[in-house]
Image: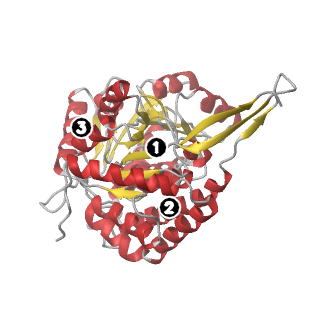
Amino acid sequence: MTDIPFGDKDSCLEGIAAAEKGFMVWRNVNPFDRALILKRAAALMHERLDEYAKITVLESGKPLTEAIGEWKVAANFFEWYAEEGKRNYGRVIPASRNNKRMSVIQQPMGVVGAITAWNFPAYNPARCWAAALGAGCSVVAKPSELTPLTAMLIAGCLHDAGIPDGVMNLITGDPAVIGQVMLQSPSVRKISFTGSTRVGKILMDGASVTHTRLSLELGGSAPVLVFPDVDVDQIAAESVTAKLRNAGQVCIAPQRYIVHEEIAERFLQAVKKKMQSIISGNGLDPKTEMGPLIREVQRENIDRIVKNSLAAGAEVQFGGHKGPGSKGFFFEPTLLRINQADNPCFQQEIFGPVMPVITFHTLEEGLMLANQTPYGLASYVFTNDLKTSVHASEKLEFGMVGINEWYPQAYEAPFGGWKQSGLGYECGPEGLTEYTEKKLISIGGV
């Protein structure tokens, strides 16, 4: 049992004041020296990997192998942005007059508020913090109140690596209270938020008054187009593994499976066979392949969506129920067959271990079904036909398209969504520039 501080409005204001002072120091630290600190923090995460991964399992429920992988990626973010901060380049602009010289530089914008979600308690903070710190900003961070320990461990590594006082500040507490304090503070130049579309809209409404900049990584409802020229059994088995990662609690999780009618029956049977073999349990047990959901509210929401989907005509092929027993908020791996795109499990973000499958006949029909959502984060295409893959990837209305792969993201590549899935980008060079201001320097009479 561990006691966690629970901050309030005053705690957040104190953190912002500290970040203001920290920024005045950090912005003047040479990017090469900043890089040494961020790399040192990354090295500490690797050194403490086994211990930290177990703590992440205990507070999130995910299997140990997933927690280990997440911590490795979190460390890699700090190492990558340590180097990217050295490449915060500007440019020289050829002027239309011979006596004029123009250049553009990028400078850190200031204090950044970072509000992150519980589903990836190491990955989500690292993705934001590393970029902001690499750009020269100071950070006031509010991790999820459901998984605060992992974020505290990352902050501890930065402290042990020698980051100056006030540069990295962490507050746990009521997200609504802390979010409003961040919005209303003129010192917080930007808020980076990872979470639900509902809360994202609240932040957008507030930012319209305060002119606070936002980066929003919100909900997703990723379609998976499966064409008949693939190895059906292989893709079906991989589908289950990808769907059940973190018990389906992944913003880019494949959700709506749109399978060509020629292979639909074989696909469903292969998915069912794979689901039957999945072992759910304690994340610290090496045999566990899927852990519990984060809390009871999440399980009840998934149970409601499944029941509403069945009432609307969906057919259960496997699972469909809450997990047995009272230890952990488990929900069975669930396979649903649906016939109409207006089914609740096709329209709503499930965020759980439920796989709805619908069939299509033509490429155009498949694309129409895939794009029939207000979300636009990730999407997937499985085909061995080059023309099909090119056409589908260009027509899908999503910020990321994975062709014959389940993980279309990397710390060196931009991560962002279209439509109601967010604003701005994280990861890659784009992630660094999200925390910088561009400044034109124009010299006349030269």
User: With 410 as the anchor, is 120 left or right in this view?
Assistant: left
Say which residue label 1 marks: 266
Residue 6, numbered label:
none
User: In the current view of this chain or complex, which residue is farthest to the front?
Assistant: 445
The answer to whether residue 207 is seen in the rendering is yes
Residue nearer the viewer, 373 or 357: 373
The answer to whether residue 240 is seen in the rendering is no
Q: CA distance from mark 1 to mark 3?
A: 23 Å
Q: Earlier in the sequence, mark 1 or mark 2?
A: 2
Q: CA distance from mark 1 to mark 2?
A: 35 Å
Element marked by disc 2: helix
Q: Earlier in the sequence, mark 1 or mark 3?
A: 1
Q: CA distance from mark 3 to mark 2?
A: 33 Å
Element marked by disc 1: helix
Say which residue label 3 marks: 306
Q: Residues within 10 Å of mark 1 (few under 14, many from 20)?
A: some
Q: Residues within 10 Å of mark 2 (few under 14, many from 20)?
A: many
User: With 4 as the anchor, is 167 left or right in this view?
Assistant: right
